[in-house]
Structures are given as C-alpha cells and as structure tokens.
Amino acid sequence: AGNDTEGLRYGVIETPEKYFLRWRDPSDASPEPDQPLLHGLREVCAPARLLELIHDFTVFDSGTKKICRHNQYEGVKAAHPFVKRGEGGIIWHTQGSGKSLTMVWLAKWILEHDARKRVLIITDRVELDEQIEKVFKGVGEDITRSRSGQHLIELLQSSDERLACSLIHKFGRSIDGDVGRYAEEIKKSLPADFDVKGELVIFIDECHRTQMGDLHRAMKTILPESTVFIGFTGTPLLKKDKVTSRETFGRTIHTYKFDEAVRDGVVLDLRYQARDIEQSLTSSEKIDQ
C-alpha cells in the first residue's frame, strides 16, 4: 500500500516496487479521495474480482509471475460479450501497454469457456509471428505456428489445434494489386473438401496495416461467415483509417490512450523539439550513388 495520496498499489510476489501499479476503475463514479487506500482495497480485493484476477489474469511468463494491468483487465472483460454474441471489433491500446498479454488472457478465456471455439492470431511481420509464438509458449499455452500456406489450410481443417498463429501472407502467394485475382488464387488452391472446423475467433495484430479493405475481404473468402475478427492496434490513425477500421472490424471494444498510459506510468511521455540543422552537400555524385 502507498501513502494517502497514492492509495493502493498492487503487484505479485517478486514484482519490483517500480512496477507496482494503481488500479483504476473507469466505471466507478465515486473515487472517495479521502480514503484512497480503502477505496483501492475495495476495487482490487472485492472477493469476486480478486478470485477473477487470480484465475483469469495471472500467468507465469517464462517463469516470471505476472498479473494484469487495469487496462488489460478492462479490455478483455469488454471483449467477452462481443465474442459471446459473435461480434467483432477493435481493441485500441497504446503501444507499450501490454497488448501481447492482453491477447493471451482473452485467448485463454475463449478457449476455456467455449469448447467449440478456436483462436487464430494473424500478423504481417515474421518477427511479430515469432513474438506471438514466444509469448504464448512462454506462458505455457500450446500454440501452433503455421509453416506454409498448405500447413495453414491443414490447421483450419483440423480440430486438434485450437490455438494457432500465422502470417497474413500464408493465405495466398502474392497480391500484386489485384485483389480479385488474389481471392481466386486462394480458392483454387483449396482442396475440394475444404471445411473449417470449429468456430473461429481471429485476432489481427497491428490491424491498421494489412487488414484495411480489400486484403481483409480477400482473406474472408475462404472463412465462414460466422468468423469473429478482433483487431488489435495501438498506432495513432488518420481520420480516413479510423473510418476504414470501423467498416472492416466493427465497433471499438475498448480503448486505452497514450495520455492514460503516461498518467499510469506505463509509458514515458513524448516531447518534441523543432530544430534547424544546417547541412551542406559536398559531392552530388556520392549522393547519387
């Protein structure tokens, strides 16, 4: 517990003090600033929430015990009713706020609460695909990483692997700007008896990049209409991109903005200084080279 101005700060055994966090509940309209410690205890240690934090929001990440931040808890909880009714959406959490573990906790809940559901995590960078595999295996989750387009098709047709990850590019060989041809290429490569097993929930990492518009629709050509798409991003978007995101994924499920993360001490604030730097080019030939 902190002093009277801080209220309760929480962590787990062996969490360094600098990583202890305050719990913030946006639904609470009466912060009771005169009793911040008791208020914090009621928020974190109410029996139902405490048991939930222990059961659903605590993991051993490569041996290190970790518990969720309040934004991760709120994001996952907000996604529960969306998944239950088969609706997709966007979880917008600023960079550095623990998006990978948010995926872990949401995937664990989905797989535990509905035996029919499967989770596929799509990325657009090899390093991100590797990172997702490492994070899930680090917390003891058996995730299968797609090795090729053919392997992905086999995974979709098999009910054995309920948790998998893949690059978006495994859905086809190339796009070349012709999405219609790309979609046809995908369909032609499928076996005649192709049938996706289970009810798919697909997480799209960095969904603002490759999932906008045509490419997203091309991927959906081989997936059942019941597939639920949840986009994850933390990148500031242009107004046009925000509109496209809503059209592609649906409503925003939860947001955790940059200024909130700065206030919580999760990320450092950004400061910009405009400066003129004098430059002179002495060899145009070298520049051309």
Image: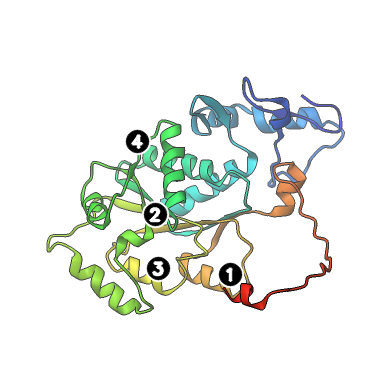
User: Does residue 137 appear left or right of residue 18 in this picture?
Assistant: left
Kind of element beneath mark 2? strand
How many neighbours does mark 1 have within 10 angstroms: few (below 14), some (14-19), or many (20 or more)?
A: few
Residue shown at 68% from the left, 25% from the top: 16
Q: Where is 151 relative to 226, above or below?
A: above
The quadrant the N terminus occupies is top right
Earlier in the chain: of badge 2 and badge 4, it is 4
Earlier in the chain: of badge 2 and badge 3, it is 2
**Residue furthest top as drawn:** 13
Kind of element beneath mark 1? helix
Label 2 to label 1: alpha-carbon separation: 20 Å
How many neighbours does mark 3 have within 10 angstroms: few (below 14), some (14-19), or many (20 or more)?
A: some
Earlier in the chain: of badge 1 and badge 4, it is 4
The quadrant the C terminus occupies is bottom right
Residue 66 locus on image (x, y percent): 57, 30
Do the residues under discs 2 and 4 have CB atoms within 8 angstroms? no
Earlier in the chain: of badge 2 and badge 1, it is 2
- Circle number at residue 59: none
Amino acid found under the numbered disc labelled 3:
His
User: Does residue 282 appear left or right of residue 193 in this picture?
Assistant: right
Amino acid found under the numbered disc labelled 4:
Asp
Residue toward you, 84 or 231: 231
Residue at mark 2:
202
Label 2 to label 3: alpha-carbon separation: 12 Å
- Circle number at residue 142: 4
- Circle number at residue 216: 3
Amino acid found under the numbered disc labelled 1:
Lys
Residue 207 locus on image (x, y percent): 49, 61
Amino acid found under the numbered disc labelled 2:
Ile
Label 2 to label 4: alpha-carbon separation: 17 Å
Residue 222, image quadrant: bottom left
